[in-house]
Amino acid sequence: MRCLALADALALQGASIRFVSATMPNAIAKRIVDAGHQLVGIAVAGEPPSSAADWHEHVFDNETQSADFDATQRAGLGDWIVVDHYLLDRRWHSDARNSGASLLVIDDLANRSYDCDLLLDATFGRDRLDYHGLVPADSNLLIGSLYALLRSEFAGQREAALIRRKSFEKVRRVLVSMGTTDIGGVTAKVVDEVLKAGPELALDVVIGASAESLDAVAKLAASDTRITLHVDTREIARLMRDSDLAVGAAGTTSWERCCLGLPAITLILAENQRPGAKALSEAGAVIALDHVGEIAPALRAVIKEPERISRMSAAAFAIVDGRGTQRVVSAIMGKGIAKAREIQLRSATAADADLLWLWRNDPFTRAGSRDTGAIPWRTHENWFTNALTDHDRKTLIAEEAAEPIGTVAFRKFHDGTEVSITVAPNARSRGVGQRILAAACEQVSDQLVAAVRKGNVPSQRLFESCGFEVSESREAGFARYVRTDNLRKRA
């Protein structure tokens, strides 16, 4: 499905797409063909290892990989090859690159050697260093949830989901989606757990036509009006938008839920899901579990805490913005990073409330804030409304080519003005922080003070680059930075 999201976006840019696969569920094959793409079947090159559900066993041997690439080549290669397969490594990749094509590898394991032009790992919390020594030095790495491959309907439902989450009061509707493969008939077991924990809840159950649980869940849905069954649905974005909570697998669907701010209880069904699930749990966006039997107690507890669910929603929204597919398309098409343009500053208005809420809840921003928890919408709304009318506060929005890329806030105290800065998540790699801060500081004539969390080296360097110097701090865990140039300019 993540490849289909990428294929659809590339097709909109004029690309011709061919899928090559040894096996393909009928429902997914139909979606590929219905989208206007070619689908070519090839022979199965080898049997996966016995414990392949965890995808940490040895890859296919060299002979098998060579045979698989030969079959792929006979199916027809393009200018770019996108390979999404855990049991292929540098041997297959090198054959592909030697064919004259450029290669994008989609991965989320960082556990073998790769040979590629681009490597995409959208795992939240993944670090570029995880691939150190595993990829060629000239490979371009697209790392983190900023590059999550989502279909366009998720970005299309994001605004409606934002509006809905703002008015959340209690859990009424739960979405159960354990993946079309329904490993071990897990969907039926999960439905039982949800009904046990919340007998008053309405359930939307998403399942594949070939799922092991289908008959059992269909029989249950026929006799229980609380359950609505969706088989091979193409309305998953709408269902996520209209749900208050999800119970689902801790796989790539996590990014879809985050885009729509849907809090989730996630079940780890394979080891390759664990790093992402752990990172999402630490960020406060999900409750990650290992066993089906843990679902009912976790659900009972969380539905009694609407404030916690609002915080989970806020955390989720900030992790995925729905534009990752377009960023990957830009990388493939060679559009690269736009040249730096002049920074424009304007005063924040009420229309910026949503944007600043999402930026404030970004995990990186939260980690350096005084309050590291996710901020629910209503808390933010009250704060922002007061900030706009407070004469001692000033909030500026920085824009580059009319695109919002950050915000700087000033707050006057008796001995100076405190300044804080947030760079938009999608602008961090462009090195705009110093330019934003320098431009904003020119608008203030007071002594400027900044509180920077100890250990936050990037922020320390940012303030130092703009003329701030370390001073004595009485705030535990924070360093105090002071800039007095503004006073001399005023004099």
Image (tube, rainbow, N blue to C red):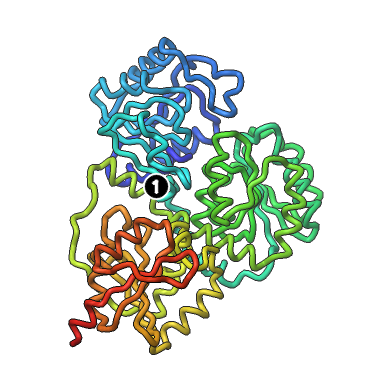
Q: Is residue 194 above or below residue 309?
A: above
- Count of labels shown? 1
- Residue in front for this viewpoint, 150 or 37: 150
Which quadrant of the structure image shows residue 16? Answer: top left
Circle 1 SS class: helix
Q: Which residue is more in the foreground, 278 or 22?
A: 278
Answer above or below: position of 326 versus 377.
above
Question: Which residue: 57% across, 55% down?
Answer: 285
Q: Residue at x 35, y 70 (%)?
A: 471
Image x and y of residue 413, in percent: 40, 85
Relative depth, front residue between 122 and 207: 122
Mark 1 residue crowding within 10 angstroms, few (<14) / some (14–19) / many (20+): many
Rendered position, 103 above or below 411 = above
- Residue 296 relative to residue 114: left or right: right
Q: Position of residue 130 (x, y in %)?
A: 42, 37
- Specify the amino acid type for callout 1: Tyr
> Which quadrant of the rendered structure holds the C terminus?
bottom left
Query: Residue, x 65% and y 33% (percent of image)?
Result: 183
Residue extending farthest to the front is 472
**Residue at x-position 70% and y-position 52%:** 228
Residue 392 location in percent, x, y?
A: 39, 87
Q: Is residue 332 visible?
A: yes
Residue bearing mark 1: 147
Could one spot residue 206 in this view of the protein? no
